[in-house]
Amino acid sequence: MNNLIDILDLTESEIDALIDTANDIIKNPDNYAEKCKRKKLATLFFEPSTRTRLSFEAAMLELGGSVLGFSESSSSSASKGESVGDTVKVVSCYADIIAMRHPKEGAPMVASFKSDVPIINAGDGGHNHPTQTLTDLLTIKREKGRLDNLTVGFCGDLKFGRTVHSLINAMSRYKNIKFVLISPPELTLPDYIKQGVLAEKNIEYIETGDLESAMPSLDILYMTRVQRERFFNEADYIRLKDSYILNLDKLKNAKNDLCILHPLPRVNEISTDVDSDARACYFKQALNGKYIRMALILKLLGV
Amino acid sequence: MNNLIDILDLTESEIDALIDTANDIIKNPDNYAEKCKRKKLATLFFEPSTRTRLSFEAAMLELGGSVLGFSESSSSSASKGESVGDTVKVVSCYADIIAMRHPKEGAPMVASFKSDVPIINAGDGGHNHPTQTLTDLLTIKREKGRLDNLTVGFCGDLKFGRTVHSLINAMSRYKNIKFVLISPPELTLPDYIKQGVLAEKNIEYIETGDLESAMPSLDILYMTRVQRERFFNEADYIRLKDSYILNLDKLKNAKNDLCILHPLPRVNEISTDVDSDARACYFKQALNGKYIRMALILKLLGV
Amino acid sequence: MNNLIDILDLTESEIDALIDTANDIIKNPDNYAEKCKRKKLATLFFEPSTRTRLSFEAAMLELGGSVLGFSESSSSSASKGESVGDTVKVVSCYADIIAMRHPKEGAPMVASFKSDVPIINAGDGGHNHPTQTLTDLLTIKREKGRLDNLTVGFCGDLKFGRTVHSLINAMSRYKNIKFVLISPPELTLPDYIKQGVLAEKNIEYIETGDLESAMPSLDILYMTRVQRERFFNEADYIRLKDSYILNLDKLKNAKNDLCILHPLPRVNEISTDVDSDARACYFKQALNGKYIRMALILKLLGV
């Protein structure tokens, strides 16, 4: 493997190896501080995403490498009509590995055909965002000690949420996973996923509109944002939105070892008073994102 | 102290210590070249300010550290509705110290409540800009050998000039300081400062509209820009603006050891023929800004 | 020499020395990996140019130095009305060398008068772009083994193409150079160049509109883009544009050792099926751009 375009490019054992490396980095950071000395990461962000970009940059810097790139396409040659293939062909001259974010689905894959250096998909439109999924998996593994035998709730916008689809795909490969799909009827998980991976792998799932009644069964609760613009009318939005805002009250019947995740940025879908609850793992998740990206860079560079 | 939000967060002895460190860095830069090895500075600039950002970045690089961040908010998650608190909470995962510039007053203080790493206010709206004030103090100390017993003139826009207010606050703590406040009537120092710190500390000051007659008494002349948009009518602006442009002619009666400062950028308020006069210290001031920021980073990181 | 503003600032022997250094870097990169340790490059890009900026940044990083700067003027103090002279005067405090791109012709030269550190012109409007020309010369030297005794074809927009004018000027200093100028009548080489350097140095040249008939004579083919907006009417553009698109068919009668160059970015003026032809040197050219900039930085810093 020389690129990471889709989370399913990775086998379970490859994911396990990445998680093991990330855990070792967390334990022994000094061992990794010079691993990528004289290596350069290019962050080609054709649309802005501070969090993801800074996570990649911090990852490379903590490996002793350096970083160059751009943070939005107005600063890039794309505005002069250059193809993504040509851009990465040229950037291959300047960097040893590329993390690419692009508003068009498939752009990182096209790029990988032309590039002379490894390409990491850092998000392509509503499609894939495999390093987010790796981040989620690392966090689940660290918090729960396992990736199998888990009841995983997804709450909010399950229709358009790219991170949800990707994590469902990834978790479906592990044993005895149950999904609880919590959303308004307008924003349920697409049929192609239910009739696809869930049916094929015979995975148990429940669909519900009620977060509180689902709460007691959950080992993991993955929150996402319910965006106003997804609703057909304002009245429905106002009626429904509070049901999908997590607060301490809604956590009353949750397990003590529930692990609450959120891909961030959050707007208001998790009340800030949850932040100091031990079950809130979304800031740890952000930190884990750096470590799994360090592991991934090491793997793709063959260091 | 773990943050620098307001210049008055620092005691006089802390300021003295920072100035001493900066002077030592200037003398022995080699001793500091690896002090922040493996440390990362995040520059979170929610509004652009090249000079301040590059000064912070150069400071961290000269300490052997590295830098990541963004230079305007369109590249940041703020455009997705994320709170400043969440942003710094996440950036705490990626960096060891944060320099934040924000158009809203108080944003860096709010950030400091959430951050796991030290926050430096790199300017918040018209409010505080403490590293500029530290820069001014270092420059005055280096040029005059002291921070007390000085007659300090401020010229131009004293009403809105954030750097003026901040330096008046900081200088008011030293002995035998006199202020000469030179401005058009529309742009005089606000009453809350005159009736506040100046009255409380019984500090001598003169208000005048005439730069040339004030000149002979000054040890320091701090120039600021008189912006057209501050005037109620164009006629007043045109009548007054030239009075507050410094040129060699207006320096005829100045002391030989006058120290001319300007926070930069300058537009036309100091004629370029002044640049080669030995009393022009504003480019030295820019250089000093790097050194005092190096000292501050060392202090906040506890290196 | 402390700056590089115009390719003609460099003598032939200085160019030879830069090419020799670049070739040595390519052979022995390890020898150069720490040459610029603790040195800082500022990339001041008042207009975006990803390729050029990343090439400079990669160059400095591969010399062990570090980089700061901005990638478009909205992030710079220029938006506050600061002069280019003041900007570089201040940036001189933060960096050891400056690469400047500016939409106004002559801005880098003005900057060089004020700067305390070397200035490299990274492109000023339609005027000069000397590091592109150095890149072209290094590529020609590496591919053909010489800079004299060559027949050099330029194809496309010879009227406005800055890189064409600059390379013609530079190549005109070598012995026995012939130029084949291939363009539509609307976009021929300006008279001031034909009656200038070409006449003065008595250099043989042919003007033609027909790429295919010119092909067999060429040692070098330098392609440029024919932009729709250069034409007075759409009909002419449509009639002519295909004549200046290079594809494998048009290469049938080319020499086996033809060297095809393009300053990039390309839009469609070279068909992608040419990319895998051994004579396509434009991606090598992009790589060479990094090495010649490394050589130039070393020279200007006196390392």
Image (cartoon, coloured by chain):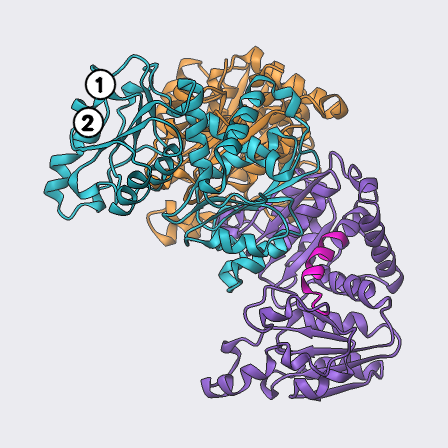
Chain colours: A orange, B purple, C cyan
With B36 as the anchor, is C165 left or right in this view?
Answer: left
Q: Residue at x 68, y 40 (%)?
A: B95
Q: Name the residue under label 1.
A: C216
Q: Give B209 or A200, whichever is nearer the viewer.
A: B209
A227 shown above or below B273:
above
Q: What element carries label 2?
A: helix
Q: Amino acid type of disc 1?
A: Pro
| Residue A267 appearing in the image | no
Letter of the chain that mark 2 sits on in the rendering: C
Q: Position of residue B85 (x, y in %)?
A: 64, 50
Q: Which of B236 and B122 is in front in this view?
A: B236
Specify the quadrant that holds the C terminus of chain C: top right
In the foreground, A70 or B91: A70
Res A213 label? none
Pointer 2 residue = C211
Residue B100 position, x and y percent, is 64, 53
Q: Disc 1: which chain?
A: C
Q: How crowded is mark 2: few (under 14 residues within 10 Å), some or many (20 or more)?
A: many
- Distance from disc 2 to disc 1, alpha carbons, whole Å, reads 10 Å
Three-letter amino acid code of the residue under disc 2? Leu
| Mark 2 vs 1, N-terminal side | 2
The answer to which image quadrant residue B149 occupies is bottom right
Nearer to me, A135 or C75: C75
Q: Do the residues labelled 2 and 1 touch (CB within 8 Å)?
A: no
User: Relative to residue A227, is residue C241 drawn left or right?
Assistant: left
Q: Quadrant of the N terminus of chain C?
A: top right
Where does the magenta region start and end?
B279-291
Q: Is the magenta stretch mostly helix, strand or loop?
A: helix
Magenta region includes residue B284: yes
